[in-house]
Amino acid sequence: MKLTYEDKVQIYELRKQGESFKRLSNQFEVNVSGLKYMVKLN
């Protein structure tokens, strides 16, 4: 699934609140490594 800008903002906010990559991966239907890469860029 392609992430929208709003999805990305929500992911950053949830990560700041302590949400796990595994749970975010399931919620947004993207793989964990892709999420880690995206978060690392910012």
Image (spheres, rainbow, N blue to C red):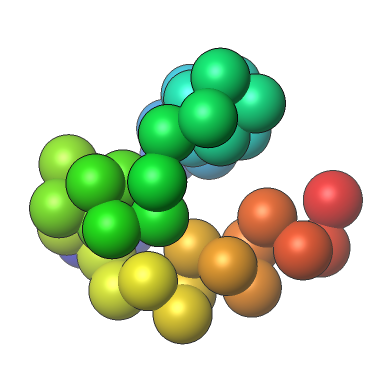
Horizontally, is 22 left or right of 5 in the view? left
Task: Give the residue at x 81% y 63%.
Answer: 41
Residue 32, compared with residue 10, is above or below; it is below
Q: Taking the image as drawn, is residue 1 in sight?
A: yes
Horizontally, is 36 left or right of 31 in the view? right
Task: Give the residue at x 40% y 55%.
Answer: 21
The count of marks equals 0
Residue 5: x %, y % from top left: 54, 34
Given residues 18 and 14, the one toward you in this image is 18
Residue 35: x %, y % from top left: 49, 63
Horizontally, is 27 left or right of 38 in the view? left
Image quarter for residue 19? top left
Quarter of the image that includes the N terminus: bottom left
Residue 30, compared with residue 13, is above or below; it is below
Horizontally, is 31 left or right of 34 in the view? left
Residue 34, compared with residue 19, is above or below; it is below
Point out the residue furthest to the right here. 42
Residue 19, compared with residue 13, is above or below; it is below
Residue 14: x %, y % from top left: 49, 25
Task: Give the residue at x 40% y 46%.
Answer: 20
Task: Give the residue at x 65% y 26%.
Answer: 16
Q: Taking the image as drawn, is residue 9 in sight?
A: no
